[in-house]
Amino acid sequence: MGRVALAAAISLLLVVAATIVAVVSPSAREWTRERLRWAPGYQIGAPSGLPAAWLNTADRTVLIFASTSCEACRRSLPVYRTLVDAVRARSELRLRIMLTSPGDDEAAYAASIGAPAADVTRIDARGTKLRRVPTILIVDRQGLVVEKKEGVLSEGEQHALMETLKKLLPL
């Protein structure tokens, strides 16, 4: 009986470890989603499926999907402020902030990150490929996803995102 209990405990620990890896590792998460045939999210190089009216006003559109009730989104506010400033400096870029919760206040959120209120819209994310908030997408005029970042960005990821913007739109 002791061996059976030990084997069961080890099996359960392996399941917990595999679950943690699947949740934490982006590549494991994608592998799991693919194997379970879950709906695909936004993929770099693939059509975004977003409305053309959101995208056709500039060469590249930076879209931020966020929610005021999301702790990760609140931690990402400094990154969003930096993006707002970077986009403002470039006429080839357009910024759109998409709030995903019904109770989100567009004007208050715009003020919190220094964005024009016209750039903030509340949406129903059910009709999109959005998997999680926060998500940052860079989409070209034709609607192709050029860059995708999900979750709270590390300092290195923030720097890489800014470098991507610079490479996409050289001075």
Image: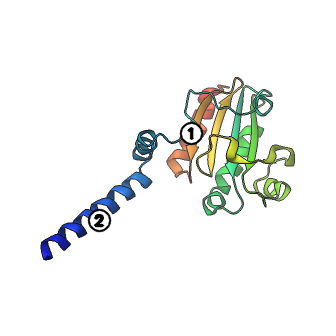
Residue 12 visible at all: yes
Pick the quarter of the image with the C terminus: top right
Label pair 2/1, CB-CB below 8 angstroms = no
Q: Residue 133: x and y, percent?
A: 62, 52
Q: In terms of image quadrants, where is residue 105? A: bottom right
Q: Residue furthest front?
A: 1
Label 2 vs label 1, nearer the camera: 2
What residue is shown at x 29% (from left), y 65% (from top)?
12
For residue 105, the mark is none
Q: Is residue 32 above or below residue 74?
A: above
Residue 168 left/right relative to 50: left
The residue at the point 71 percent across, 51 percent down is 81
| Residue 73 percent location from the top left of the image | 64, 57
Q: Quadrant of the N terminus?
A: bottom left
Dot 2 amino acid type: Leu
Q: Provide residue 60's location: percent of width, then percent of height.
A: 70, 29
Residue 64 visible in the snapshot: no
Q: Residue furthest top?
A: 142
Q: Residues within 10 Å of mark 2 (few under 14, many from 20)?
A: few
Dot 2 or dot 1, earlier in sequence: 2
Local SS, label 2 = helix
- Residue matched to label 2: 12
Residue 41 shows which numbered tag? Answer: 1
Residue density around tag 1, few if under 14, some if 14–19, many if 20 or more, within 10 Å: some
Q: Nearer the viewer, residue 88 or 44?
A: 44
On screen, residue 4 above or below 64: below
Residue 52 horizontal/vertical position (percent): 77, 28
The amino acid marked with disc number 1 is Gly
At 79% from the left and 56% from the top, the residue drawn is 109
